[in-house]
C-alpha cells in the first residue's frame, strides 16, 4: 500500500471518517478484482498529488463485508467520498485518473 493511502477496518472506519479534517475518498475493493487493480495506481498518484485536499483510504470487502453492506456496496470498485462524515459523491467502476479527479474536484477544498 502506498504511503499516503490508509487501510480502514471496522474498528477504524467511523473514527477516521468522522474525525477527518479533509474529505476522505474510500475505495471498496478486493484482491481478485481486475478493475480494482487497474485503479489502485491511479489512487496512489492522486494521493501523492493532492495530499492537502483529500485522504485516500481502502476497505477490502472480503475482509470487511459489514462495511460494504453498511454503505450498499454491490459492485467493486466502489469509491465513496466522505465529507464531514457524510457521503457526498459515489463512483462505481474503474475510470481514468482524469475522470476520477474531475468528479472529485467540486467536492474538495481548494489547494493550500
Image: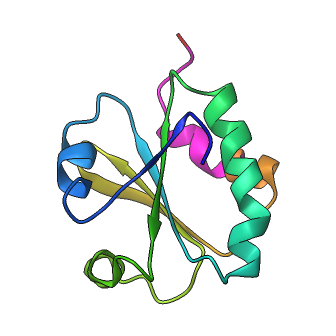
Q: Position of residue 59 (x, y in %)?
A: 43, 65
**What residue appears at the point 58 percent right and 80 percent down from the top-left corner?**
76
Q: Is residue 18 magenta?
A: no
Q: Report the predominant secondary structure element of the magenta stretch.
A: helix
Residue 94 seen in the current view: no
Residue nearest the observer in this picture, 81 or 16: 16
**What residue appears at the point 76 percent right and 79 percent down from the top-left corner?**
34
Image label count: 0
Left or right: 97 with respect to 73?
right
**What residue appears at the point 68 percent right and 43 percent down from the top-left corner?**
44
Q: Position of residue 15 (x, y in %)?
A: 18, 46
Query: Which image quadrant for residue 13?
Result: bottom left
Left or right: 7 with respect to 20?
right
Q: State how the image is colored.
A: rainbow
Q: Position of residue 28 (x, y in %)?
A: 49, 70
Residue nearest the observer in this picture, 103 or 1: 1
Please tell me whether residue 19 is drawn above or below residue 68 in the rendered image.
Answer: above
Direction bottom: furthest residue: 74
Residue nearest the observer in this picture, 29 or 49: 29
Residue 18 seen in the current view: yes
Please tell me whether residue 110 is drawn above or below residue 14 in the rendered image.
Answer: above
Q: Position of residue 88 (x, y in %)?
A: 38, 55
Residue nearest the observer in this picture, 1 or 16: 1
**What residue appears at the point 67 percent right and 48 percent down from the top-left corner?**
43
Direction top: furthest residue: 112
- Region rendered in magenta: 102-111
Please tell me whether residue 30 is drawn above or below residue 81 in the rendered image.
Answer: below
Amino acid at each position: 500500500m502506498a504511503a499516503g493511502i490508509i487501510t480502514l477496518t471496522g474498528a477504524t472506519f467511523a473514527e477516521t471518517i468522522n474525525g477527518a479534517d479533509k474529505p476522505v475518498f474510500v475505495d471498496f475493493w478486493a484482491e481478485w478484482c481486475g478493475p480494482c487493480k487497474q485503479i489502485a495506481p491511479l489512487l496512489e498518484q492522486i494521493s501523492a498529488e493532492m495530499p492537502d485536499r483529500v485522504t485516500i483510504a481502502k476497505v477490502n470487502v472480503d475482509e470487511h463485508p459489514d462495511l460494504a453492506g453498511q454503505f450498499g456496496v454491490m459492485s467493486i470498485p466502489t469509491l465513496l467520498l466522505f465529507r464531514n462524515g457524510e457521503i457526498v459523491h459515489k463512483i462505481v467502476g474503474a475510470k481514468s485518473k482524469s475522470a476520477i479527479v474531475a468528479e472529485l474536484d467540486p467536492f474538495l477544498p481548494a489547494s493550500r
